[in-house]
C-alpha cells in the first residue's frame, strides 16, 4: 500500500482513487463494454434503469421534496423516508458516470435540471437536507443514529466527485457539495460536537472529496469519523451497537459484522483513509476483516448478510440459504470494498470477490426488463411470491418477484451507479503494466504509466464461454506487462501469448514484452458446469450441493421442475449436464408420507433407490424469477444424503 | 366438541373453562404437586419468581405508572413500553392462582395492595390504561395496530377471572374488569367503530369473562373480534398483515402464521369461542391450523417461531436451530392452545404437545435460581454470551445467558402465571372418568361427575424416571374410568392395573372399575436416551441428530465439551450413554484446515475415521446456560454425514 501523505487532485473519470504506488483504476471513459452479460446490463442501465429511477423519484415525491423546501412547503409536503435525499444523489452519480462514458447531451440536460433543483434547496450556511432543521422538523444533527443526514451528505459529495471527474471541477454541484462538506467539518470537527453518522458513507465521500478538491481538511474529517467510531458514541438501540459498528473501533475488529451495508461502507471508507494516510495498521485490519468475512460470512453468491433482523451479517458459518438477506446494496458495497483492497494490495482474492458478487448479486437485482429490482437476494425461495404490480411500491421486496420501487429504495439507484461505472472495475494499471481484472467484450484505451497510450480489444463471450482473446490495437514500442487474472475456480486454464498454450494456475499471469499492433494473448478458462459443496461448518447446507459454471452460480426453479423445489434431490453420481452452457441436473422428486410430527427415531432418506430420476434444467441465479412466480433453490439436497450411511 | 349455547357461570379455580360434554380441567386447588421437575419449578415460582416480577415492576416504574395516573403525573412520569400495564395484570393473575392453591395470606395482602393501586387509576367511564387518552398522550384507541390497549384490557380481565375463581366474584377487581369490559363492548360493539386489537388476547379474555360473569354480551364481543379479523382491518405494516393474522379470516387459514405469540393467543380465543358457540367449523379450522403447525412449523422442543424478524413462524419446514426464536411466551401460548384443544377434542396429540413445550420451552426460560429468564430459546448458541448484570434490563435477552428483566418483559410474568396454574394441566375429568394428562408427583382430589369425590396419589420421579404409580386414596364405590396418557415416544410402555404388566401403545389407556382405597395402577414408560432425526424436508438439520429422553430434549454445551460446539460431530454407531439419566454421546472434535473460501469442488467430511472419539455428557435442554457463558447445540452433525456416500 501507499505512503503518500499529501492530498493530490485526481480528476480522472474514476469512481475512487487509489495509492499512487499501487494499481490505478481506469476511468469510465477508458473502457468500452460491448455486449455480453456485463455489457448488456450496462446498456439496460443506460436505456431503462436510469430513467426508471428518475421517474420514480419524481413520482414518489422524493425529488419534489427539494422544490417544496424552496417553496416553504416543508415539512407538510415532504414524502419518503429520512434517507430519500440520498436517492437523488445516487441517481446524479449514476448520470455523471454515464455521461462520462457516453457524453449524451440529453442525459446531461436532465442532470443539470436535477442539480438546479437540489442546489436551490441549499441553505445559506450550506446545510442541505429536506428532513431536518425547519420549523416542525427535528433539529439538525439531532438523530445521528437514524437520521441519515451525514449519509445523505456523503452521497451528495460522491455525486459531486463523479460530476467533477466527468464534467469538470468547476461544476456548480461541486460548489454545492463543498459548502456541505465545509459545514460538516465545522459541525463535526476536532473541537465540535463529536459524533458519527449511524449509516457510514460520509467517510469514503470525504476522502474522495479531498482527492477531488485537494483540500486535506476533508481527509482529516474522515479520519475523525473513522477513529471516533466503535466506542459507543451512538445511543443504544435494540439491534445492539454492532448494528452500526459502534461496538469495537475499526482497527480493532476481527470481522465484518452488524448491518451488512453499513459494515462494507465503513470498511470502504477506512480503506480510502488508510491509503491516503499510509496507515498500514488500519489497512491490514480492514483487509483481515474482509478476508475473514469472505471465508466465513459470505454466501456462495458473494452475498453478505444472513439475518433479516437488522439486515445483518450472521456469525461465522451462519449462512442459511432461506434466511439469506444478501441485500443488493451490500453486494454493491462489497464490490466497492474489494476493488479498493485490490488496488492497494494486488491480492487476487479481492478481484475474485468482485467478480462473484457482481455476477451473482448485483446482476441478480434488476429484472430482465430493467423495471424491477430485488432488494434482498435469497438463496432458497420456499413459496411462490405474489405479483408485484408494476406501479406499486413494495416495502422491501420479499418473495420471488422483483418490485419496481421500495419504501426503502436504496438498491435501484445503487445498481444504476455501479453499472454506469462498471468500466472502472475491468482493468487497472501501474508502472509499465496493465492488469485485466474482469473479462468483458470491448475495448480498453489508457495511458500506461512509463509506457504511453495503449489500446486493446478484448474478444470474449465470458462468462458464457471461457475463451478470452486480447488483441493489441495500438501500443508504443516500449516493453510493458499485460497481467490477466485466472480465477480461483479455473483449474486447468491455458495461456497462449504466441508460443502455443501453456497451463497457468489461479492468480495473475503476466506477459511482458514490447507489444505491437496485432499481437494477441489468449486465455482459456475451463467453462463447464461443476458441483460445489460447502464447508462442513455451514450447518444449513450440509448434505446439499450447488452447481457453478465459471463465476456464475446456478439454481433450480419450480417453473422448470413442475413442482416445488422443496422436495427435490439431485443425483451427484451423474455429472451436471452442460450443453453449450445449458446446464442441467439429474434429480428425483418425492413427497414424503404425511406425518403428525417431523421428528422420529429413524433417519429419513431423500430419494429411494427406486425414485424416478429426471433431467431438470438449471438457470443462472442472476436470471431467476424472470418467468413469473416460482420457488427456487441454489443448494440442492443430494440423493441419499439425509443419512449418515 | 360441545353444543351448549347459553353462557354458564363457572367459578371453579380453573384457568379456562371447557365444553360441558368434553373434558373439564381440574382447579388449581385440586392438584398438589410435590417435587420433581414440575413441582420444583412451581415451588421456585412461589418462593422466588413472583416476588422477582413484583420487585422489577416496582423498580422499573411500570406499577408506579398507575400511581402517577392518579396523581396526575402522566404522561411525563410514565415508564415502560406501551404494553407495560399488562405485566401488572399477568402478575395479579399469577398471584391469584397461587393464592387459590396456597391460601397464603401475605400473598393475598400484596395482591390487594396492587389491585387497589390499579383500581384507583380507572377513569369514570371505565377506561383504564396508563398510556393513552390524557393530555399529551395519544388518543384512546388511536393505535389499534401497536397500542396494545385491548391486549392490556384482556389481561386485566384474565386477572379478574383468576381472582373471581379463587377469591370470589364479588372481589373489587372483578368490578374493575367489568367496567373495562363494558367499555370495550360499547366502543367496539356491533354498531361502533369496528376494529380489532393488534395483539390478540382480548378474545379469550372476553369469553372467559362471560363464563365468569354469565354475561353473554362479552361472548358476543369476542365473536365480533374473531370474525372481523383477517380482512385487512388493521393498517398496513412493514411486517405484513400476517404478522397480526389480519391477512386471512380465522376460519379460512391453513396454518398458524405470523407473530407466533399473536398467532397462538388468537387461536386460543377462537377455540374458546368455538366451544361456547358450538361452532364446529371454527373449531375444526383452528385445530387443523394447530396440527399443521405442529407437523411442519414446530421445533423438536415444541417451540414455535423460527424468524427473529417479526418474532414469527416461518414457512413449512423452515426450522433453523440457530435462527430459532421460539419465544417463551409462544410456548406459554402453545400450552394454552393445546390444552383448550385437548379438553374439547380428547385428541392425545394436544396433550403430547403440552408436555413437550412445557418441559422444553416454558421450563427452559427461568434460571435455576428463578432470577433470570430467556425471552427466546435458540436451539444452537454459536458464540459465548456476555454476562447480563443481575440488576440491568436487557433488550430481549439474546445470547447464552438469561436476563433478570427485559424492555419487552412479557415472559417472566407469563411463566409465573403458567407455573401458578400448572395443576390445571395435570388431569381432567368427564362423566364417570378421570384422565391423567401429565405425570407429576403429588395428589389429586376432585369431584368426578356421576361418581363423587375421588382422591389419588401419584408417585413418580417423571420425567427423570418412567415409573408412575397411581394409588387410590379415596373413592366412592361406583365404577369409573381412570385414563392415563401414553406419550407418542413411549414405545414399549407397560400398564399394570393389578393383573401384571401388559404392553400398551401410545394414546390413552383406560382402567374401568369400582376403585377402592389402596388400589394401584402402574404405568411404566421406557425412559432411556434415544437418537432422534428430523424430517428430510427440514433442510437446516439435515445430517444432524438430536438426543431425547422421555419428553426431554437434551443438548451439548461447550462447558462440558471443553471447546466450541461448532466443530463437534457425534458417532451414532455408538448408542447414547444413559446411566440413570446421565446422558452422553460419543463425539469427535476437529478443526478443519483454514480456507479462504468455504465452497469447493469436493465434499468435506466431518470426522475423519482417525478422529479421536470422546464421551461427552449432554444436559437437559431446559437446564442449559446455568453454568456461565457457553455455546450449545441440540442438533449435532453425524460423523461422516456431510457426505452423501
Image (spheres, coloured by chain):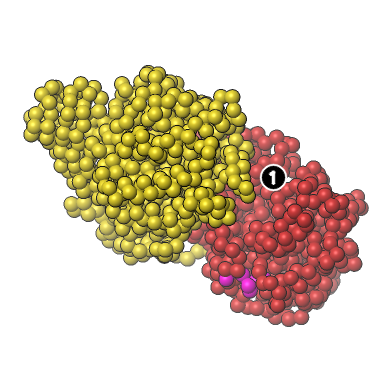
Chain colours: A yellow, B red
Q: Chain of mark 1?
A: B
Residue that badge 1 annotates: B406
Query: In this view of the protein, which residue sits in the foreground, A443 or B178?
Result: A443
Query: In this view of the protein, which residue sits in the foreground, B385 or A9?
Result: A9
Q: Secondary structure at mark 1?
A: strand
Determine whether, in the image, residue A299 is placed left or right of residue B192: left
Query: In this view of the protein, which residue sits in the foreground, B490 or A407?
Result: A407
Determine whether, in the image, residue B332 is placed left or right of residue A218: right
Decide: is B145 above or below A265. below
- Residue A128 position in % (x across, y down): 51, 41
Query: In this view of the protein, which residue sits in the foreground, B177 or A491?
Result: B177
- Residue A640 position in % (x across, y down): 36, 52
What's the magenta region? Answer: B225-231
Q: Residue at x 83, y 53 (%)?
A: B69
Q: Quadrant of residue B192?
A: bottom right
Decide: is A125 above or below A276. below
Determine whether, in the image, residue B559 is placed left or right of residue B479: left
- Residue B457 position in % (x across, y down): 79, 58
Label 1 neighbour load within 10 Å: few <14, some 14-19, many 20+: many
Q: Is residue B216 visible from the viewing direction of this image?
A: yes
From the image, which quarter does the N terminus of chain B lie in?
bottom right
Q: Residue at x 20, y 46 (%)?
A: A34
Q: How many marks?
A: 1
Residue B230 covered by magenta stretch: yes
- Residue A81 position in % (x across, y down): 52, 51
Q: Is residue B52 visible from the viewing direction of this image?
A: no
Q: Quadrant of residue A163?
A: top left
Q: Residue at x 49, y 42 (%)?
A: A122
Decide: is B545 above or below A447. below
Determine whether, in the image, residue B350 is placed left or right of residue A277: right
Q: Residue at x 83, y 67 (%)?
A: B125
Amino acid at each position: 500500500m501507499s505512503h503518500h501523505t499529501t492530498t493530490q487532485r485526481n480528476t480522472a473519470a474514476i469512481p475512487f482513487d487509489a495509492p499512487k504506488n499501487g494499481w490505478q483504476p481506469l476511468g469510465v471513459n477508458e473502457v468500452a463494454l460491448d455486449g455480453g452479460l456485463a455489457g448488456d446490463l450496462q446498456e439496460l442501465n443506460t436505456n431503462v434503469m436510469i430513467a426508471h429511477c428518475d421517474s420514480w423519484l419524481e413520482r414518489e415525491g422524493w425529488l419534489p421534496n427539494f422544490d417544496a423546501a424552496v417553496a416553504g412547503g416543508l415539512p407538510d409536503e415532504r414524502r419518503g423516508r429520512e434517507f430519500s435525499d440520498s436517492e437523488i444523489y445516487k441517481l446524479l452519480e449514476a448520470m455523471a458516470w454515464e455521461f462520462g462514458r457516453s457524453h449524451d447531451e440529453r442525459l446531461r440536460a436532465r442532470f443539470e435540471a436535477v442539480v438546479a433543483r437540489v442546489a436551490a434547496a441549499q441553505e445559506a450556511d450550506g446545510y442541505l437536507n429536506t428532513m431536518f432543521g425547519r420549523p416542525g422538523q427535528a433539529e439538525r444533527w439531532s438523530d445521528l443514529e437514524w437520521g441519515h443526514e451525514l449519509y445523505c451528505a456523503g452521497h451528495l459529495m460522491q455525486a459531486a466527485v463523479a460530476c467533477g471527474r466527468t464534467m469538470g471541477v468547476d461544476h456548480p454541484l461541486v460548489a454545492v457539495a463543498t459548502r456541505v462538506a465545509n459545514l460538516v467539518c465545522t459541525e463535526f470537527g476536532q473541537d465540535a460536537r463529536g459524533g458519527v453518522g449511524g449509516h457510514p458513507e460520509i467517510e469514503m465521500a470525504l476522502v474522495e472529496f479531498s482527492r477531488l478538491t485537494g483540500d486535506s481538511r476533508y481527509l482529516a474529517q474522515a479520519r475523525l469519523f473513522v477513529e471516533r467510531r466503535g466506542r459507543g458514541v451512538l445511543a443504544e438501540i435494540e439491534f445492539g451497537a454492532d448494528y452500526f459498528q459502534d461496538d469495537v473501533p475499526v482497527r480493532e475488529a476481527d470481522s465484518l459484522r452488524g448491518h451488512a451495508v453499513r459494515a462494507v461502507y465503513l470498511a470502504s471508507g477506512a480503506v480510502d483513509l488508510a491509503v491516503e494516510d499510509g496507515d498500514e495498521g488500519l489497512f491490514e485490519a480492514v483487509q483481515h476483516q474482509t478476508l475473514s468475512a469472505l471465508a466465513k460470512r459470505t454466501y456462495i453468491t458473494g452475498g453478505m448478510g444472513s439475518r433479516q433482523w437488522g439486515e445483518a451479517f450472521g456469525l461465522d458459518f451462519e449462512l442459511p440459504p432461506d434466511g439469506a438477506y444478501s441485500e443488493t446494496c451490500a453486494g454493491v458495497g462489497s464490490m466497492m470494498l474489494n476493488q479498493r483492497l485490490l488496488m492497494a494490495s494486488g491480492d487476487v482474492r479481492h478481484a475474485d470477490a468482485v467478480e462473484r458478487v457482481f455476477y451473482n448479486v448485483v446482476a441478480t437485482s434488476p429484472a430482465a426488463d430493467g423495471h424491477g429490482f430485488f432488494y434482498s437476494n435469497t438463496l432458497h425461495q420456499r413459496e411462490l411470491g405474489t405479483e408485484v404490480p408494476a406501479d406499486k411500491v413494495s416495502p422491501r421486496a420479499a418473495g420471488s418477484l422483483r418490485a419496481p420501487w421500495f419504501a426503502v429504495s436504496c438498491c435501484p439507484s445503487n445498481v444504476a451507479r455501479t453499472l454506469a461505472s462498471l468500466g472502472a472495475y475491468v482493468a487497472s494499471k501501474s508502472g509499465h503494466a496493465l492488469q485485466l481484472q474482469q473479462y468483458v467484450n470491448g475495448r480498453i484505451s489508457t495511458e500506461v504509466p512509463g509506457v504511453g497510450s495503449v489500446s486493446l480489444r478484448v474478444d470474449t463471450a465470458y462468462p458464457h464461454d471461457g475463451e478470452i482473446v486480447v488483441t493489441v490495437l495500438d501500443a508504443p514500442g516500449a516493453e510493458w506487462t499485460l497481467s490477466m487474472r485466472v480465477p480461483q475456480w479455473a483449474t486447468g486454464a491455458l495461456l497462449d501469448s504466441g508460443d502455443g498454450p501453456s497451463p497457468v494456475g489461479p492468480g495473475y499471469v503476466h506477459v511482458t514484452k514490447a507489444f505491437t499492433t496485432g499481437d494477441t494473448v489468449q486465455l482459456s478458462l475451463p467453462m463447464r458446469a461443476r458441483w460445489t459443496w460447502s464447508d462442513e461448518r455451514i450447518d444449513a447446507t450440509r448434505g446439499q450441493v450447488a452447481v457453478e459454471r465459471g463465476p456464475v452460480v446456478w439454481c433450480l426453479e419450480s417453473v422448470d421442475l413442475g413442482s416445488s423445489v422443496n422436495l427435490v434431490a439431485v443425483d451427484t453420481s451423474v455429472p451436471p449436464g452442460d450443453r453449450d452452457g445449458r446446464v442441467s441436473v439429474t434429480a428425483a422428486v418425492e413427497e414424503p408420507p404425511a406425518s403428525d410430527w417431523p421428528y422420529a427415531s429413524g433417519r429419513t432418506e431423500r430419494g429411494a433407490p427406486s425414485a424416478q430420476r429426471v433431467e431438470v434444467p438449471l438457470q443462472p441465479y442472476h436470471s431467476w424469477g424472470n418467468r413469473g412466480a416460482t420457488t427456487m433453490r441454489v443448494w440442492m439436497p443430494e440423493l441419499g444424503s439425509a443419512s449418515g450411511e
